[in-house]
Amino acid sequence: MEAGEKKEVIISVRDLKKYYEPKLSFSQSIHGVKKQVKAVDGVTFDVYKGEVLGLVGESGSGKTTVGRTLLRLVEPSGGEVLYRGRDIFKVSHDELASIRKSIQIIFQDPYDSINPRFRIRDVVAEGLRINKLYKDEADLDRKVRDALVAVKLTPPEQFMDRYPHELSGGQRQRVAIARALALGPEFIVADEPVSMLDVSIRAEVLNVMLDLKDQYGLSFLFITHDLALAKHVCDRIAVMYLGRLVELATSEELIENPMHPYTRALIDAIPVPDPTAPKLRVAIKGEIPNAMDVPPGCSFNPRCPYATDKCRTEEPKLREVSPGHWVACHYAEEIAKGRKETA
Amino acid sequence: MPLLEVSDLRMYYVTKAGYVKAVDGLSFSVEKERTVGIAGESGSGKTSVATTILKLLPSNARIISGSVKLQGKDLVTASEEEMREIRWKQVSMVPQASMNALNPVFRVGDQIAEAILAHENVSQAEAYQRAEDLLEMVGIHADRAKSYPHEFSGGMKQRAAIAMALALRPPLIIADEPTTALDVIVQAEILELLEDVKKKFSTSLILITHDLSIISELADEVIIMYAGEIVEKADVYSLYKTPMHPYTQGLLGAFPDIRAPRRRLASVPGSPPDLSSLPPGCSFNPRCPYATDKCRTEEPKLREVSPGHWVACHYAEEIAEGRVKPNR
């Protein structure tokens, strides 16, 4: 994302919120206890045409909920998601059906998301049949072949009549991509698409995604817990913590010049495959607190080595600290320049 | 004499379809106070190494040959009664999912005390005191000994499992994917803790994982397994500096290093091995970019290619020196 360059926005997420009301015990309810789980609490970002945007966070950060809300698989508590300017929460049923062809999702577990009783040809054809996106059977067959070729399951004849269990995990995940691709989407949410796969075969799935981006200008939201993987796969990375974005920048900028104390701690905690590298040191302690008891002010303040009274009362807004680099921290500049003492 | 010496160990599962060769002729040793990392992917047999050493095997598993000498005593020929004495006291295990290692209906402190009482002639109070001390040592406040496992977070359960593995001060601990289910910051804390307790107790460690960065963080020596066999074995510096087996090279090429410049990751072609129908010759040959007819017929032996660096590949030297080109 060069400064000044005009980027075509495919998806705009504005102040997205998703709160859950947990079941309360009898005594809590008669005492008027009100509790909310703020799974997503005011998230704003854009996805540009032809980019892979990484959404990185630990378990409980809300990253998966954001992904599902983008397809309206989850109804939000507030905010909007615009697909080419149209709010997907406000459009008519028919319009939503047409938008859904343009926005697809790939799930973590290809063993769960593909019907084991379908042949591969029927897995890929299902969406085309439901949406009646073919002229005749020959056309359907051709579209299925094209999708399989696009995900490098070649020659397609070798795969079309097989069942999912006859394929490896990496091949199955590529079938899931082919199924999404058959509908001609512009944007695909990929929710931890390789975390169930062995390291040695992950790249066969990742490189198919990157080829689709390069060749057809597809956009992806790549949801992952793995910041090292995100660096190599994504053009930009957004880091989530307790339902909020804490930092957003290009991949290189985010990894080489992290400004939020949480991003810095995440990077420091990642081991590298090199025994001569300095040993890990853990800068922050503890685990993500329960989303039911989010602390006031900055939600990271109880774990932050720099936290002040301001951090404990005033919620930092996500602001653009340098062009394209957004951080939600009162002291981002001071910390980055090493001018802020730890508390 | 090394603390643990495994020689030509073979453990096969008996199935209707025939033998599944989970551990197929493994030899390695663990010296005192050293950490040996065993790396492999699905179907490599790495977890079976742990369950075979501890003889915690399902009924269809057979130890076909070999010996496992722990301080000179062969565990393969030991009786079940002897094994009960040896487990926890001589060698203990931190399992993959520590949520399953802790009994959900007993308080954490009682569980650790129970393990101590089963092996040592001490009073109830003394055992409980030691359990509290152990929890403190792994970073859990002694008060929490009264908690049940479900009241612990994932990281705390893993700490408690480590405390339990240390309870009888065994000279050897086997940790199987000790951080796999944990978030990265908690993982870093657990790795730090393992390093600390190893020093404090002068323990040796066998660390089993699919993650090459965790091995490089903790291990002194590294074993790379593929299809039940060792394909490469070396000290940690030499293995990461000059990986010689094409599988090791492929694994490192597939691994995202956060410090490295942005690049497309490379995959190892093909699928993980099916242990019930391995190809003849080198098990890795269907996925190997350098495979020749020799590789498809003749099984390469693990041999010492340079001092302390063992590789099971016919062409290790040629590949390392760039004298052969990949043929795909």
Image (cartoon, helix red, strand yellow):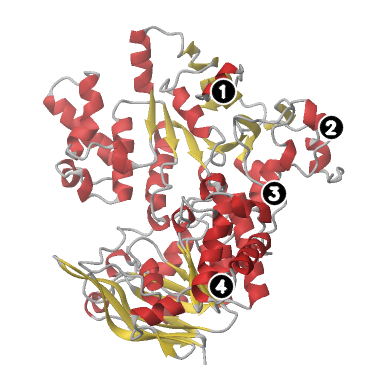
Residue found 44% across the figure and 68% down from its top: B248
Indicate whether B71 appears above or below A255. below
Residue tagged 4:
B241
x, y (%) of residue A88?
Answer: 45, 14
Q: Is the residue marked by circle 1 packed among few (<14), some (14-19), or many (20+) residues within 10 Å?
A: few
| Left or right: B107, with B323 as reference point | right
Residue tagged 3:
A285
Indicate whether A118 appears above or below A269. above
Indicate the amino acid at tag 4: Lys
The local secondary structure at tag 4 comes to helix
Q: Nearer the viewer, residue B107 or A241?
A: B107
Kindly indicate the quadrant of the structure image that contains residue A124: top left
Residue tagged 2:
A309
x, y (%) of residue B80?
Answer: 34, 78
Q: Chain of mark 3?
A: A
Asked if both marks, 4 and 2, belong to the same chain, the answer given is no
What separation in Å lies between label 4 and label 1 (alpha carbons)?
62 Å
x, y (%) of residue B306?
Answer: 49, 86
Q: Disc 2 or disc 1, which is closer to the eye?
A: 1
